[in-house]
Amino acid sequence: MQNNKYTSEDNHGCSGECYEAWVAQTGGVVALETASAQARAEASPEKLGEQAYIGCIACHGAKGEGGIGPMLAGQSATEIAAKLLQYKAGETRGKQSSLMWSQAGLLSDQDIDNIGAFVESL
C-alpha cells in the first residue's frame, strides 16, 4: 500500500489497486465506521467518560487531582454532571467559570454523564 503523510488506518491516501488492497485489508470506510460505532456502543460509561475527559486533564489532572482547576476526584457522578450542566447553561460557579462555559458547551448531555461516571471511578 502506498503511504503519504495523511495515511492512517481510516485514511488510506491511495487510489486504484492501492485502494482496492486497502479495502480488502480494512473492509473500507463503512466497515471501519461500523466497527468504531459498535465499540462505542459496547463501551462502559466510565470508558467513554475517560475519552471525553482528555479535554479536562490540563486543568484538573489526569486523575482528577486538580491543578489550575479544582480537584474532581472524590465527587459523585451526579455532582460532576450537575456542575457541568450549570456551566453549559452559562451559570457562574466561581472565578474560572468563563473557561468552563466553552468547555461544557462542547459536551453533549451523554458526554456529561459519561465524564461524571469516569470521575466517580477515580
Image: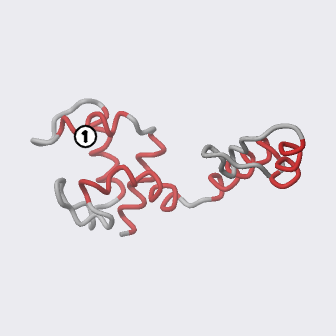
Quarter of the image containing the C terminus? Answer: bottom left
Task: Name the residue beneath numbered marker 1.
Answer: 100
Q: How many marks?
A: 1
Judge the density around disc 1: few (<14), some (14-19), many (≥20) Cα neighbours within 10 Å: many
Give the vertical position of 47 relative to 87 (above or below).
below
Task: Please tell me which residue lies in front, 81 or 118.
Answer: 118
Residue found farthest to the top: 90
Q: Amino acid at mark 1?
A: Met
Its colouring scheme is secondary structure
Side of 43 relative to 95 (left or right): right
Q: Is residue 26 above or below residue 93?
A: below
The residue at the point 18 percent across, 38 percent down is 97
Q: Position of residue 106 (x, y in %)?
A: 39, 35
Q: Residue furthest left?
A: 95
Picture quarter containing residue 66? bottom left
User: Of helix, strand and loop, which one carries label 1?
Assistant: helix
Q: Position of residue 29 (x, y in %)?
A: 76, 42
Residue at left offset 32%, top offset 52%: 56
Query: Between residues 43 and 80, which one lies in front from this camera angle?
Result: 43
Q: Position of residue 40 (x, y in %)?
A: 62, 53
Residue at the spot 56% in from the left edge and 61% down from the top edge: 44
In the picture shown, does residue 26 fall above or below 109?
below
Identify which residue is drawn at 36% across, 61% down: 119
Q: Nearer the viewer, residue 110 or 52?
A: 52
Q: Is residue 27 left or right of residue 106?
A: right
